[in-house]
Image: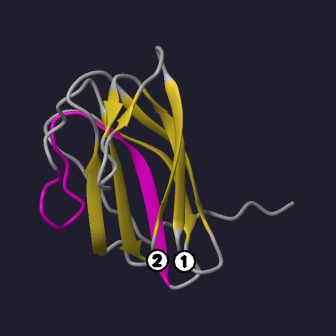
Amino acid sequence: FVARQIQLYLHKAFGGPASQIPSDLCFDGHGGIVLVGGYAGSVSFGGAALMSSTGITNIFSAKLSTDFTNFRSGGFGGSVGAQVVRAVACDGDGNSIFGGWFDASLALGGPQALSSTGMDDAFLAKYAR
């Protein structure tokens, strides 16, 4: 057995004044990396800072190139409560599908926010490449 030293190829920090917690990533098959997670306060992935978190936590999605340059990023949330993304998958067309949970409400960028029917509700959302 011969031990080999691991060499760091590339790294980059993303952040803001409060917490940013990634939960999952996928490769879209078209040269992009989709990173999702939660944040409080605000966060930037190299583009404009995402909206300030208005609930306990909000959801972020960042599409990055393989050198971690920002293609686009977005923040999603509600006015109260927690919004949490647990997983992301990329399909063969480069679309990304998120799954997670929320309480109270969740605005995902569509025409209508989701409203919780109980304490914590699950959600799925699909975004085009």
Furthest toward the right, the residue is 1
Q: Nearer the viewer, mark 1 or mark 2?
A: 1
Residue drawn 28% across and 63% down? Answer: 73
| Picture quarter with the N terminus | bottom right
What range of the chain is rendered magenta? 31-50
Q: Is residue 126 above or below residue 122?
A: below
Colour approach in the figure: secondary structure
Q: Is residue 59 above or below residue 93?
A: above
Residue drawn 53% across and 85% down? Answer: 30
Secondary structure category for the residue under label 1 = loop
Residue 52, horizontal then vertical, whole percent:
13, 41
Residue drawn 45% across and 77% down? Answer: 129
Furthest toward the bottom, the residue is 30
Image quarter of residue 56: top left
Residue 113, horizontal then vertical, whole percent:
32, 42
Q: Residue 118 vs residue 105: left or right?
A: right
Q: 83 or 20: which is nearer to us? A: 83
Q: Is residue 41 magenta?
A: yes
- Look at mark 2 in the image and give the residue it sits on: 32
Q: Residue 37 vs residue 28: left or right?
A: left
- Look at mark 1 in the image and give the residue it sits on: 94
Task: Please tell me how crowded label 1 is: few (under 14), some (14-19), or many (20+) other residues with Cα within 10 Å.
Answer: many
Residue 103, horizontal then vertical, whole percent:
39, 23
Q: Is residue 44 magenta?
A: yes
The reply to whether callout 1 and callout 2 are in contact (CB within 8 Å) is yes
